[in-house]
Image: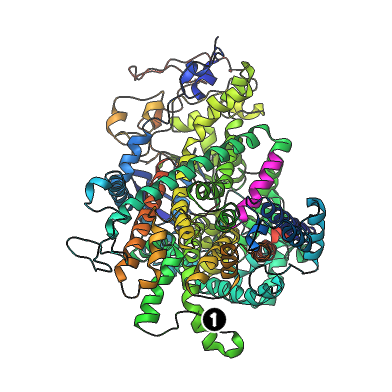
């Protein structure tokens, strides 16, 4: 087990109160594995990643919990020790390729500085390795590109450079925070495929943070779904899609447009818009993290909510075989063959009437 | 990049021309008669005409302009009306190095103080040091430079007797004499300049430290100093370089007044004396010289951009 | 006339902001609570509070000067060059005039010059900026060329030159100094116009047939007031320093009105012997400018305006 995050919490003390951006999350990553962390904006997924690396500014942020990486608890390390891990054992790829590179430094410099610092390579050795890396990520004419500046690269190419930088010191783990969100759809697939190939080939573990369920299905082996700073469901990918065990996941899957009929039919059209089916958005708004209600954070938008949901915070419980869910009614989910859990009142906690959905093939 | 340089140089030349023309016409628009001021008996028509003819003021304004323009291009600024009728160009050539020395020294002193102050201020934000620097910056901008000059004279020259109060010694007479005469006025002029630069560096650094590429640099595990000095600072300098162009204006304005206080016969002093004596050729020449320094300083700043920012170089 | 619901929300003042084009309605109110927020900022920011207090005292001093001191600013006494004492709290100058009185009267002149120059410069600059931003094309180019030219130039030297050419005296000084602000105000106004021009409610107004001037005046101008106010505050301090400098050089107002610069200038040869003649006028200037700058900064924070081109 490469990375073991246990009870990680991040709180921000703002003028308006304390915002609990990440609330007691735990998950694991094995060597070489690709794990996805899925959630909407404000779910705490990015903050969690930054906290992992110790990149959050400490006075406004308060980080608690344990992050055991290669046997050492990163949370307990001082800044200097943490610095040696960053870039060297853990690489990071960020969301915005247009602003992630220093406009005043050459690409070569930005690639080699980490290597020269962490691996002690000479200028020539680092340069050669940089050329290799650029070739690896698919940038043509790498040698001449080294002397160029970021503004001379397109968005997709810059992201490839970012990946190269992340891989530069042969890390064991890469954190990718929405690596393709800012890219054109056509480039997205390329970059993701590139990352998948490289991580498999080099045996590097990957934590893929995204809001896009489509990406998750294809590239990750495990998925952690986050909502309001908490992990609400955690499972192997195909298990999650086959049988989502948390209302939020159900809702997410219902709102994803699908073109391929096969998946929809296999799952009985549940939770999905089969071809031509209606997309069902999740009602309501994400919660205010400074004023979370007691109990389940998703309760206000949940069509399956029962009175208990308001008082207890559902713990993350293991159901079958590595499939965890933080829902009191996880065992019942998904409800029968209902494709659209609409208009289910919280006052009728018992049977959910099977809704004849317009999307049912 | 070459087109960038060319455009800037061209722009500078155009500005100089515009300034010169403006100066010419404005002086001619003066109410009141410079001629009358120069003669004992303004009523003597013949004398007036003669003087006018000699000064070329009897021709049409357009002719005067072209003549003047042509002469100016050749470096002939006319002669001082007042006193010994020295060629204005000679007055300027003598005064120029003094003002330049002063401005340059002020610039250096200001930068030496402001850059570290701004950096520390940004890095140790809201600490006592930061507040101190901010306070100093505010004070620096609130003090009239001539007042600061006077106070400096009182403390360092009159009371402590460490430095001379007035006058100027050229470099040829030795480093210390030159320096000692210029330090106090340089501090007086440089203080508001330093204040602006320090604050600008601070706010610019704060902005830069929030950028994505700095977060990326940190995620690479680079050392703090490397990030600060090799990644953040060069980027922070860009807006500062812009401000420097304007701040040079402060230096020049300051020089005008401070030279007066410290009795340094630089351009500022020449300008003021010319004004008080209604010595128009001198005023004209001095303004042109000041503008020239100014325009070229800005040109240098613009070219500096090209050096710092590769986006301009490789466009 | 029916306003689409989605536009109505974006218009300050709601659906009522759309005139049936006759021009008699009152202007929309400034940002709600801005004054209250400023009060909050004042309380939190000690510098701003200090600035407000000092400025308040100075204004009171200036307005009530005749009642506050028993002396006449020009009254000469036999007690010349007296250090601060009970009868003359700040001492007297070489002609026996009471320094405190002169400084208080000088406050009037300085404040007057500060406000009037800024007002003039603001009006001209803002109009130019509005025109440039709104109409674009060649008007914009011409105006901005001029603004760029002036922006880089040392305004003080221009002021010196103007006073030299056109003579000294209060009016000329005011005009000379006012010119310095045109570039800053024009830039601020223009950039605000450019941002606002693209907003929905302007497009809506145009569709409803409002004329250009009307749009500029009723819709754009009220929303540019925040940065303009900040710019105005910041500019006043320049006026005070510029006037002091001009007077010091002998290029300021007539010598019977005591201005701070003039007081310093008169005292120049005596300062080494009479320290109070140098320190106090300077202190007045410094305190005033400092207070204005503190307040300006606080205003900028409240109204959430980013620094225009950096110079504080």
Q: Secondary structure at mark 1?
A: loop
Name the residue nearer the viewer: B197 or B118. B197
Q: Is residue B154 visible?
A: yes
* Label 1: chain letter: B
Say if the magenta span includes residue C147: yes
Residue drawn at (82%, 60%), measured in percent from left and top? B67
Name the image colouring: rainbow
- Quadrant (top left/top right/bottom left/bottom right) for the N terminus of chain C: top right
Report the magenta residues as a range. Answer: C140-154
Name the residue nearer the viewer: B262 or A232. B262
* Residue closest to the far bottom: B174
Q: Is residue A336 left or right of residue C82?
A: right
Q: Position of residue A357 (x, y in %)?
A: 54, 15
Residue drawn at (59%, 53%), measured in percent from left and top? C162
Judged by its main secondary structure, the magenta piece is: helix
Q: Position of residue A14 (x, y in %)?
A: 34, 46
């Amino acid at each position: 087990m490469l990375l073991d995050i246990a009870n990680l919490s991040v709180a921000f003390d703002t003028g308006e109160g304390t915002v609990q951006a990440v609330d007691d999350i735990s998950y694991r990553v094995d060597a070489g594995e690709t794990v996805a962390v899925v959630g909407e904006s404000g779910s705490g997924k990015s903050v969690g990643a930054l906290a992992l690396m110790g990149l959050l500014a400490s006075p406004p942020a308060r980080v608690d919990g344990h992050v055991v990486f290669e046997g050492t608890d990163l949370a307990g390390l001082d800044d200097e020790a943490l610095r040696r891990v960053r870039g060297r054992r853990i690489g990071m790829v960020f969301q915005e390729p247009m602003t992630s590179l220093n406009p005043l430094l050459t690409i070569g410099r930005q690639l080699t500085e980490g290597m020269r610092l962490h691996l002690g390579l000479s200028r020539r050795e680092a340069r050669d390795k940089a050329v290799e890396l650029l070739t690896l990520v698919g940038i043509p004419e790498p040698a001449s590109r080294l002397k160029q500046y970021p503004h001379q690269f397109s968005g997709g190419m810059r992201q490839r450079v970012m990946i190269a930088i992340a891989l530069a010191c042969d890390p064991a783990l890469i954190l990718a925070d929405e690596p393709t969100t800012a890219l054109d759809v056509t480039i997205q697939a390329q970059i993701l495929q590139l990352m998948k190939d490289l991580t498999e080939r080099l045996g590097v573990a990957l934590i893929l943070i995204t809001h896009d369920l489509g990406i998750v299905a294809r590239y990750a082996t495990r998925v952690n779904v986050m909502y309001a700073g908490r992990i609400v469901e955690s499972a192997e990918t195909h298990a999650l899609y086959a049988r989502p065990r948390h209302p939020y996941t159900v809702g997410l899957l219902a709102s994803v447009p699908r073109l391929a009929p096969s998946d929809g039919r296999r799952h009985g059209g549940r939770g999905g818009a089969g071809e031509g089916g209606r997309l069902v958005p999740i009602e309501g708004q994400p919660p205010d993290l400074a004023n979370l209600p007691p109990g389940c954070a998703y309760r206000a938008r949940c069509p399956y909510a029962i009175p208990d949901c308001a008082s207890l915070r559902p713990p993350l419980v293991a159901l079958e075989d590595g499939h965890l869910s933080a829902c009191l009614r996880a065992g019942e989910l998904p409800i029968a063959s209902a494709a659209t859990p609409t208009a289910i009142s919280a006052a009728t906690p018992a049977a959910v009437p099977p809704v004849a959905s317009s999307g049912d093939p | 990049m070459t087109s960038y340089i060319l455009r800037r140089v061209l722009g500078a030349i155009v500005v100089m021309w515009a300034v010169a023309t403006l100066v010419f016409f404005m002086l001619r628009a003066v109410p009141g008669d410079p001629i009358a001021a120069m003669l004992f008996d303004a009523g003597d028509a013949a004398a007036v005409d003669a003087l006018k003819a000699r000064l070329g003021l009897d021709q049409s304004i357009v002719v005067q302009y072209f003549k003047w323009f042509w002469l100016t291009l050749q470096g002939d600024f006319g002669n001082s009306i007042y006193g010994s009728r020295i060629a204005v160009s000679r007055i300027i050539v003598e005064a120029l190095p003094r003002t330049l020395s002063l401005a340059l020294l002020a610039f250096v002193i200001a930068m030496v103080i402001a850059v570290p102050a701004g950096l520390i201020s940004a890095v140790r934000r809201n600490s006592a040091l930061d507040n101190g620097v901010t306070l100093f910056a505010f004070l620096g901008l609130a003090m009239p430079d001539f007042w600061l000059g006077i106070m400096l004279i009182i403390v360092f020259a009159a009371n402590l007797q460490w430095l001379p109060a007035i006058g100027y010694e050229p470099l040829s007479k030795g480093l210390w004499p030159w320096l000692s005469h210029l330090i106090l006025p340089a501090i007086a002029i440089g203080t508001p300049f330093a204040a602006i630069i320090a604050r600008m560096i601070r706010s610019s650094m704060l902005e830069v430290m929030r950028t994505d590429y700095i977060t990326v640099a940190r995620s690479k595990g680079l050392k703090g100093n490397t990030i600060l000095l090799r990644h953040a600072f060069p980027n922070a300098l860009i807006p500062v370089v812009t401000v420097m162009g304007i701040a040079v204006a402060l230096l020049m304005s300051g020089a005008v007044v401070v030279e007066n206080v410290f009795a340094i016969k630089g351009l500022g002093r020449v300008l003021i004396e010319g004004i008080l004596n209604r010595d128009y050729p001198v005023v004209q020449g001095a303004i042109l010289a000041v503008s020239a320094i100014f325009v070229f300083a800005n040109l240098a700043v613009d070219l500096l951009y090209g050096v710092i920012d590769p986006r301009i170089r490789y466009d | 006339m029916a306003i689409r619901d989605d536009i109505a929300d974006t218009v300050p003042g709601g659906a009522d902001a759309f005139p049936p084009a006759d021009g008699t309605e009152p202007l929309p109110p400034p940002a709600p609570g801005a004054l209250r927020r400023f009060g909050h900022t004042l309380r939190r920011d000690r510098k701003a509070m200090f600035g407000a207090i000092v400025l308040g005292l100075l204004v009171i001093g200036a307005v009530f000067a005749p009642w506050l001191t028993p002396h006449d600013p020009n009254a000469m006494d036999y007690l010349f060059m007296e250090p601060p004492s009970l009868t003359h709290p700040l001492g007297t100058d070489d002609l026996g005039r009471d320094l405190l009185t002169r400084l208080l009267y000088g406050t009037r002149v300085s404040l007057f010059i500060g406000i009037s120059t800024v007002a003039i410069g603001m009006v001209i600059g803002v109009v130019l900026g509005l025109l440039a931003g709104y109409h674009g094309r060649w008007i914009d180019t011409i105006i901005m060329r001029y603004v760029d030219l002036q922006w880089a130039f040392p305004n003080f030297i221009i002021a010196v030159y103007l006073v030299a050419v056109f003579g000294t005296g209060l009016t000329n000084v005011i005009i000379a100094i006012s010119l310095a602000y045109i570039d800053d105000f024009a830039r601020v106004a223009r950039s605000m116009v450019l941002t606002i021009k693209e907003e929905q409610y302007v497009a809506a107004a145009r569709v409803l047939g409002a004329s250009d001037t009307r749009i500029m005046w009723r819709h754009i101008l009220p929303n540019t007031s925040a940065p303009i106010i900040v710019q105005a505050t910041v500019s006043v301090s320049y006026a005070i320093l510029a006037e002091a400098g001009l007077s010091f050089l002998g290029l300021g107002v007539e010598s019977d009105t005591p201005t701070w610069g003039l007081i310093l200038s008169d005292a120049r040869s005596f300062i080494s012997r009479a320290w109070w003649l140098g320190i106090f006028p300077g202190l007045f200037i410094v305190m005033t400018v400092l207070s204005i700058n503190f307040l300006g900064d606080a205003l900028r924070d409240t109204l959430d305006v980013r620094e225009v081109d950096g110079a504080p």
